[in-house]
Image (tube, rainbow, N blue to C red):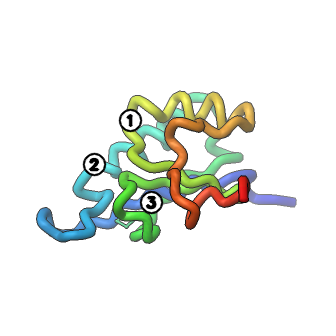
Amino acid sequence: MKRFDKHIFICENKREENHPRGSCGTKNSSELTEKFKSRLKELGLNSMIRTNKAGCLDACEFGPTIVVYPEQTWYGGVKPEDIDEIINEHLINGRPVERLLIKDKRFNRDGE
Ligand code: FES
């Protein structure tokens, strides 16, 4: 029996402000973690979908970056106002939110 159906990993890595790679933590990614946790709890989904803060996911230039497992769907530039759409469309209805997908061949490679 599975413990969780899905995991959402949210990069909270924080580099110094002028670091050339930037970092998700300096773009307020911790707000994303808190909002995912609270919305999933409100919806009664937190026992099936686990939200975890993560260190660097090596997609810094696309941050704030999140990845959803087991399907390995990568989202970039995620804002708190995008979270309800990700929950409703992707996590509940299984339709990834196209406009937020990282458009880079190293990620989201299903179409190859
Ligand atoms: S700092 Fe977020 S992916 Fe590297």
Q: Quadrant of residue 18?
A: bottom left
**Residue 15 spot, x, y in % from top left:** 22, 69
Q: With respect to residue 46, does 56 lie above or below?
A: below
SS at badge 2: loop
Kind of residue sitting beneath label 3: Lys
Earlier sequence position, callout 3 versus callout 2: 2
Which tag is nearer the camera, tag 1 or tag 3? 1
The x and y percentages for residue 77 are 39, 46
Indicate the secondary structure of the residue bearing disc 3. Answer: strand
Sequence-first tag of 1 and 3: 3
Category of crowding for the residue at label 3, using alpha-carbon neighbours closer than 10 angstroms: few (below 14), some (14–19), many (at least 20): some
Quadrant of ligand 1 in image: bottom left
Q: Nearer the viewer, mark 3 or mark 2?
A: 2
Residue identified by numbered label 2:
28
Query: What is the quadrant of the N terminus in the image?
Result: bottom right
User: Which amino acid lies under the numbered mark 2 shown in the image of this protein?
Assistant: Asn
Label 1 belongs to which residue? 80
Mark 3: is the Cβ under 8 angstroms from ligand 1? no
In front of the other: 84 or 71: 71
Residue behind mark 3: 53
Left or right: 53 as drawn, with respect to 92? left
Q: Position of residue 88 (x, y in %)?
A: 63, 29
